Amino acid sequence: DDNLLKKIVAHAKEYGFVFPSSEIYDGLGAAYDYGQNGAELKNNIKSYWWKSMVQMNENIVGIDAAIFMHPTTWKASGHVDAFNDPLIDNKDSKKRYRADVLIEEYIAKVEAKINKEVEKAAKRFGDKFDKDQFVATNDRVVRYTEEIDMINSRMKAAIESGNLNQLKALIEELGIADPVSGSKNWTDVRQFNLMFSTELGSLAEGANKIYLRPETAQGIFVNFLNVQKTGRMKLPFGIAQIGKAFRNEIIARQFIFRMREFEQMEMQFFVKPGEEMQWYEHWKEQRMKWHKVLGLGEENYRYHDHLNLAHYANAACDIEFNFPMGFKELEGIHSRTDFDLKAHEEYSGKKLQFFDHQENKSYVPYVVETSIGLDRLFLAVLTSAYTEETLEDGSERTVLKIPAALAPSKVAVLPLLQKDGLPEKGREILDKIKYDFACQYDEKDTIGKRYRRQDAIGTPYCITIDHQTLEDNTVTLRDRDTAKQERIDISELKSRIEELVSL
Ligand code: ATP
């Protein structure tokens, strides 16, 4: 739902979660800055991931590799030669597009036509409507379906053979026009590498071109031996990392879903060759469980198994989330074989192997990886949290129902009035809990307005200090989602909140 995405973007900006990058200069395409609440939420997501991967697993350790890497890394990984998008320009509008995306958008239009026919027929036939039968027999729908099959198979053939001008031919045959100008005057299709490059030091041109890493994984592969030796790791074991990655995405729409600078949380799990499928299934299941515990709604997740595998993989799937734009990739689980370590052995001349004492021999381990976009998970949290509702007392509110463990602030301390010693009491309470919980303190405006502000940034609990507090040392604790309040002794606050905000 486009409208929902727009609302989330506006809310994220208004409440200090996400700003367009360098906004005073009108922003920069597909780059975003995280504001005061966004940075907290992001840190909480990271720490939840890090804890469950590194802290909870004896055989997984975490590292933090540099973004800059020796340029040969990217030759070995295949990114210099194969990390490309097929681009086409319109000669009249001078706009640039991904050729495959133009064709996919055309397919989406044909699909919409099919859906329209189905809807019309469903209305006409009422209860007696058999959708499968209709789709299989209706002349028009059959023609549309055949057209889609033809386009898909030609697109696949073009990409697989590397003969990209077959994409141009397809675009021309289908009469696809530039969405901006309507012109059908297209250039040839050419490969465009998604890696950003820059120059190291100030030596002569070309010699020292380096790249901003397009994935964090390679920082782990090149450190395989270092970690294995210094950590005395035995197979199977994992190396985890959270860090920035950069891709010069051409289609960079949809807010923080597709950015040019983003963050990945990856874990490469090294296993004995032949055991990779069993570990692939293990991680596929574990990662889905992890998501479901998070509390964004089990119905919002699904698997998407890959049939067309990347050059390095022997099995791969995505965990998709129901974003405002529909179900889209949130995390990838890939069985990468020994592709990367073997390639690095070849290019570096170093042995990247594990000595197996039981078998009394060395071999290059296989790798199963889990790779999730931190910013995409952030967007998933906002998507599931954003709620507009009317409370029992008739008042309307926009509330972010962020899982308490991830919420930017856990508690807000709110003296009912700015007098009678209530603010002093409030500060006293704040001092007692602020080391343990991220807190807000607010004494301005009516209490109702203050509750709305906390709702809007997703603070799960509000502590209100009133005159009774001065008499009996109790406060009210208000729950964000139910708006219900309980009265509780100040001495019990810390343990009660702890219990409420832990996952
Ligand atoms: P997509 O098909 O959406 O481009 P991908 O298959 O290229 O993604 P991977 O290379 O598998 O993505 O990267 C792993 C994860 O990194 C993805 O699941 C996604 O969450 C995240 N990711 C990839 N590209 C971006 C991007 N441009 N912006 C934000 N997150 C990204």
Image (cartoon, rainbow, N blue to C red):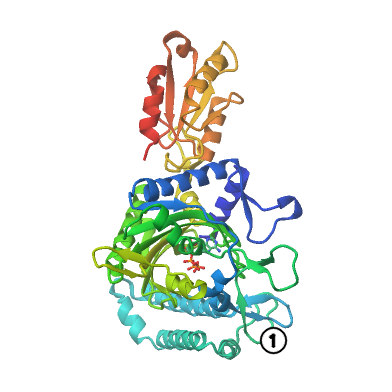
Would you say residue 381 is visible in this rendering? yes
Task: Identify the secondary structure beneath mark 1.
Answer: loop
Task: Estimate the x, y position of residue 497 in percent, counting from the top left.
Answer: 40, 29
**Residue 464 to residue 66: above or below:** above
The residue beneath circle 1 is 185
Q: Residue at x 50, y 64 (%)?
A: 218
Name the spot of residue 422 as percent of width and height, x first.
Answer: 54, 15
| Residue 94 quadrant | bottom right
Closest to the observer, 212 or 491: 212
- Horizontal and vertical percent position of residue 74: 55, 71
Name the residue type under label 1: Asn
| Residue 336 position in % (x across, y down) | 40, 70
Q: Residue furthest top?
A: 471
Residue 11's place in the image compared with 360, above or below, is above
Residue that lies at the very extreme toward the front in this rendered image: 360
Residue drawn at (75%, 50%), measured in percent from left and top?
A: 24
Location of residue 103 with respect to 370 vertically, above or below = below
Q: Nearer the viewer, residue 96 or 387?
A: 96
- Between 137 and 429, the one nearer to me in the picture: 429
Q: Say if residue 239 shows up in the picture.
A: no
Quick one: 357 or 121, which is closer to the camera? Answer: 357
What is the total number of numbered labels drawn onto the structure image?
A: 1
Q: Residue at x 40, y 23 (%)?
A: 493
